[in-house]
């Protein structure tokens, strides 16, 4: 009987090998293994240097790993191979945004729209880019087009609502903001408690659901007084580092921990829904200053020299916990060195309220003789309020410190950028929320150092008595 011969294995072609490696890289990418995914994409490109898709995916992985310059180069190569790809233009716009080249980012997103005029996602991304450079009306139009193309596009509906709020249409904006509760992991309500619909509250207990934004928590504490006037017993859930501060308020009856089991609660309402339910608009914001009682302060007492004209607090990172050690700086944060023009002004004493990795910036720059570091001694937000009470002025980015100072009625100069939180509105140098706040806005393609020059001039004029 003759033996059956085995067929010789088919030799893998160069194109097949490239595709196999490329698919493996995609799997690694989706699993979050960026380094090995990048290596795989690079090897696939060696085998298939004319594949625009590989360059595009390599760019996405490089951007996700914090290398937007390299990502941008990949997108350009991808477009050179396959001109007019809307997805690549969108990715290019995202990388340009990371690099602070906001005007060019908008142009890339506009080209994406031209090449994919029926893509709701492309209009949405273009709207986000336009909002980032302060072109809110154009952004609103793009979000609206995205919704027309895809009526259930909840992310676009949310951005449309926030843009209306930024433009000052608060009644409609607050209505549209409610769509957030339909997004994954955005609804903070308990399942077994009715939601307050604005009915009378005499003798009822209302729970305010925290929604994760620490600044908004301070900002919206003013509304607790309105609820007390309606006869309510008010419970405000909050993170532990807010407990001491909130307990000092006569308008708050209890501060339960997040997710704690509660009894005898009649109704609840998410924090961000309060102004809409209370009929708040730009012209009727209650309690614009001095609504934040300061608890008895046992923290650090500042050593301010009697010859000092102004004691000025500085905060350059927006998160309460400060900048993380390894994470990139947020677009709304500044670098301490960006504020260098303030350091040489005589007759002021600078005090850092910074927490987290930013506390090392003073030492890194050798500024210990010029900036007192007290932030690291703060245990909670009440400690921050106690220190701010001792200052004459707070200069900060959009942060918990900005809201605390404003709620205390303390003079606060806040640095912000185009596309900032809607509550600061657009193109205004004051705030409907805090009478003591001045807003210094960075242009789309300006640097934070440019804003520091304006801060310095204003401070010098105050010291001269001309401002």
Image (cartoon, helix red, strand yellow):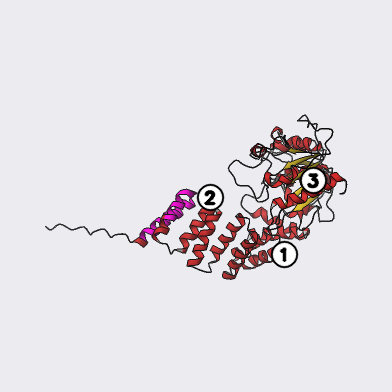
Please tell me the numbered disc located at residue 65.
Answer: 2
Q: Is residue 10 left or right of residue 283?
A: left
State if disc 2 and disc 1 touch (CB < 8 Å): no
Is residue 49 shown in magenta? no
Q: Position of residue 321 (x, y in %)?
A: 66, 40
How many tags in the picture?
3
Q: Residue at x 82, y 42 (%)?
A: 410
Q: Position of residue 108 (x, y in %)?
A: 60, 64
Which residue is label 1 attached to? 137
Please tell me the numbered disc located at residue 412.
Answer: 3
Rendered view: 441 above or below 317:
below
Q: Quadrant of the N terminus?
A: bottom left
Mark 3 vs mark 2, CA separation in Å: 36 Å
Q: Residue at x 60, y 55 (%)?
A: 99
In which image quadrant can residue 7 be found?
bottom left
Mark 3 vs mark 1, CA separation in Å: 29 Å
**Predominant SS along the magenta part:** helix
Q: Secondary structure at mark 3?
A: strand
Mark 1 vs mark 2, CA separation in Å: 33 Å
């Amino acid at each position: 009987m003759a033996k059956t011969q085995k067929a010789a294995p088919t030799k893998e072609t160069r194109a097949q090998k490239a595709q196999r490696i490329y698919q493996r890289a995609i799997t690694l990418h989706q699993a979050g293994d960026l380094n090995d995914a990048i290596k795989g994409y690079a090897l696939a490109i060696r085998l298939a240097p004319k594949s625009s898709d590989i360059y595009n995916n390599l760019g996405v992985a490089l951007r996700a790993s914090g290398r937007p310059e390299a990502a941008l180069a990949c997108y350009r190569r991808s477009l050179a191979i396959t001109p007019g790809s809307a997805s690549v233009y969108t990715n290019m716009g995202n990388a340009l945004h990371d690099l602070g080249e906001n005007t060019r980012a908008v142009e890339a997103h506009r080209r994406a729209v031209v090449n994919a005029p029926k893509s709701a996602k492309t209009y949405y991304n273009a709207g986000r880019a336009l909002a980032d450079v302060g072109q809110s009306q154009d952004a609103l139009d793009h979000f609206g087009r995205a919704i027309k193309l895809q009526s259930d596009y909840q992310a676009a509906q949310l951005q449309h609502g926030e843009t209306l709020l930024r433009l000052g249409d608060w009644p409609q904006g607050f209505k549209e903001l409610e769509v957030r509760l339909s997004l994954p992991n955005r609804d903070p309500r308990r399942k077994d408690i009715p939601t307050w619909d604005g009915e009378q509250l005499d003798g009822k207990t209302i729970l305010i659901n925290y929604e994760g934004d620490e600044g908004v928590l301070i900002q919206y504490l003013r509304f607790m007084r309105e609820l007390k006037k309606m006869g309510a017993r008010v419970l405000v859930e909050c993170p532990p580092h807010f407990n001491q501060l909130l307990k000092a308020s006569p308008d708050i009856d209890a501060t339960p921990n997040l997710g704690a089991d509660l009894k005898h609660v009649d109704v609840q309402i998410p924090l961000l829904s309060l102004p809409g339910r209370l009929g708040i608009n730009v012209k009727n914001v209650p309690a614009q200053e001095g609504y934040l009682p300061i608890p008895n302060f046992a923290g650090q007492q500042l050593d301010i020299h009697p010859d000092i004209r102004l004691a000025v607090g500085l905060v350059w990172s927006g998160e309460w916990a400060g900048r993380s050690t390894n994470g990139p700086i947020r677009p709304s944060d500044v670098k301490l060195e960006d504020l260098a023009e303030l350091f040489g002004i005589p007759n002021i004493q600078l005090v850092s309220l910074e927490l987290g990795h930013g506390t090392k910036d003073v030492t890194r720059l050798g500024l210990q003789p010029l900036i007192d570091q007290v932030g690291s001694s703060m245990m909670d937000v009440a400690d921050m309020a106690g220190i701010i009470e001792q200052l004459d002025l707070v200069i900060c980015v959009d942060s918990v410190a900005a809201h605390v100072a404003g709620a205390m009625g303390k003079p606060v100069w806040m640095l912000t950028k185009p596309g900032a939180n809607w509550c600061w509105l657009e193109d205004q140098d004051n705030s409907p929320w805090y009478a003591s706040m001045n807003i210094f806005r960075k242009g789309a393609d300006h640097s934070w150092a440019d804003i520091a020059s304006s801060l310095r001039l204003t401070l010098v004029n105050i010291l001269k008595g001309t401002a």
